[in-house]
Amino acid sequence: MPAYLETVNKILSLGTIFLQVLILVLIVNLVFIRHRNNKVLLFFKKYTFYFGFIVALLAVLLSLFYSAVVGFPACELCWVERIFLYPQLILFSMELYKRDRSIVDFSIVFAILGTLTSIYHVYVENGGASNLACTVTNPLNPGVVSCAVRYVYEFGYITIPIMALTISLFIISLLLNYKYMSHME
C-alpha cells in the first residue's frame, strides 16, 4: 500500500463526516425551519447543481483512485453502487451545460437506488447474511472479491460503503431541497 494512503483515507473520512453534517443541516432546515426566506435552503437551492457536480466528480475520481491507483478490487456491491453513482456526474454535467432542470427526478431515482445498495452493503460488511457470491472469499474463484472486506476503516465507522451512502444521501437531500424551494417560488 502507498505510504500516503493513510492520509488520503483520513481526509476522505473527514470529508464524509462534513457531508453528513451538511445532510443534517439540510434535513433540519427542511423539516423544522422551512419557509420561503430560509437563507440556508436558498443557498443550497442556488448552488444545488454545482454541489452535485463537485460531489459526483470527486466520488467518481476517488472510486477510480481506490481501484486503479491503490489497487483495491471492487466487489459486486461496489460495482452496483458505481452504476448508480457514475451517471450522476453525467446528469449534473448536462444540467450545468443545458440549465433546463430536467435531471432532478432522474438523479433522485439513481441516488435512492444507490442509497438502498449502500445500506445493504453496510449490512453485509457488518456480518449480515447475503446470497451474493461476494459475501465470502472463495479460494476456488479468486476473482470474486468479498463484499465484507473493509479496505478503509476510519473513526470507527467510515468505510467505502458509508462514503457511498453519504454521497447518495447528500444528493437526495440537495435535490429534495431544490424541488421544495422551487415549489415555494
Image: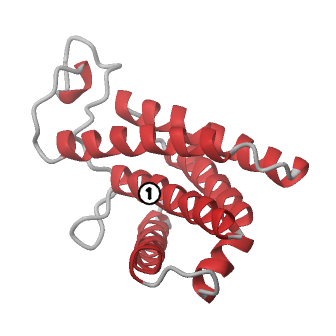
**Residue 85 placed where, x, y %?**
55, 42
Work out whether residue 125 or residue 107 is closer to the camera in this orientation and state it: 107
Query: Residue at position x 52%, y 39% from top?
Result: 109
Left/right of residue 52 with respect to residue 77 in the rendered view = right
Q: Determine whether, in the image, residue 41 is placed left or right of residue 138.
A: right
Quadrant location of the N terminus? bottom left
For disc 1, the neighbor class at 10 Å (few under 14, some 14 to 19, many from 20) is many
Colour mode of the rendering: secondary structure
Depth check: 158 or 185 in front?
A: 185
From this viewpoint, is residue 73 visible?
Answer: no
Q: Which residue is depicted at the point 35% across and 19% down?
A: 143
Quarter of the image for residue 77 reads top left
Residue 162 image offset from top left, x and y in percent: 34, 56
Residue 174 can be seen in this image: yes
Above/below status of 181 relative to 167:
below
Q: Is residue 83 above or below residue 180?
A: above
Q: How many marks?
A: 1
Q: What residue lies at 28% left-to-right and 46% top-to-bottom?
A: 119
Q: Secondary structure at mark 1?
A: helix
Find the residue positioned furthest to the top. Answer: 140
Q: Residue at x 64, y 87 (%)?
A: 37
As rendered, which of 31 and 22 lies closer to the eye? 31
169 left or right, relative to 86 = left
Task: List the residue tagged with mark 1.
Answer: 169
Amino acid type of the residue that numbered disc 1 sits on in the rendered structure: Leu
